[in-house]
Image (cartoon, rainbow, N blue to C red):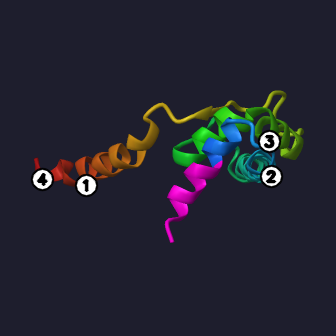
């Protein structure tokens, strides 16, 4: 019933080197890398940041994520792939972004 908790347990097992959870993490890492490449191809992003479980996945199977990301990029747009990094604000990123939106929207009222 708790998808996030289940994913965290699978990632714990993958980090410990358990075969099946590690294979699952690698499969999800490849999908994440391909998705990141699709994002860059669509909007020509200069950087891709990953937070939450995706950042943890990047730490565990980063090579798989980076390889799939690089393989999925359209090469004519740029010479080098944009960086694929864990989000600097970690799990607080969405909260900081929401607070910034409140600030921006209330600015004329101040």
Callouts 2 and 3 close, C-beta under 8 Å: no
Q: Earlier in the sequence, mark 4 or mark 3?
A: 3
What residue span does the magenta drawing correspond to? 1-10
Identify the residue under disc 2.
Answer: 27
Q: Secondary structure at mark 2?
A: helix
Q: Nearer the viewer, residue 5 or 105?
A: 5
The outermost residue toward the bottom is 1
The outermost residue toward the top is 80
How many residues crowd mark 3 within 10 Å: few (<14), some (14–19), many (20+)? many
Q: Horizontally, is 91 left or right of 56 in the view?
A: left
Task: Find the distance from the CA under tag 2 to the CA under tag 1.
Answer: 41 Å
In this orientation, does residue 46 appear?
Answer: no
Q: Position of residue 92 (x, y in %)?
A: 38, 42
Task: Find the distance from the CA under tag 4 to the CA under tag 3.
Answer: 43 Å
Q: Main secondary structure of the magenta part?
A: helix
Q: Is residue 66 covered in magenta?
A: no
Residue drawn 51% across and 57% down?
5
Identify the residue under disc 1.
Answer: 105
Residue drawn 81% across and 33% down?
78
Identify the residue under disc 4.
Answer: 109
Q: Nearer the viewer, mark 4 or mark 3?
A: 3
């Amino acid at each position: 019933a708790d998808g996030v908790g289940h994913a965290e347990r699978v990632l714990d097992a993958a980090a410990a080197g358990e075969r099946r959870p590690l294979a699952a993490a690698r499969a999800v890492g490849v999908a994440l890398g391909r998705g990141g490449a699709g994002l860059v191809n669509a909007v020509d992003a200069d950087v891709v940041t990953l937070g939450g479980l995706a950042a943890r996945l990047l730490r565990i199977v980063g090579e798989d994520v980076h390889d799939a990301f690089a393989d999925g990029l359209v090469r004519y747009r740029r010479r080098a792939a944009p960086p694929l990094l864990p989000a600097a604000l970690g799990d607080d990123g969405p909260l900081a972004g929401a607070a910034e939106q409140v600030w921006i929207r209330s600015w004329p009222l101040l």
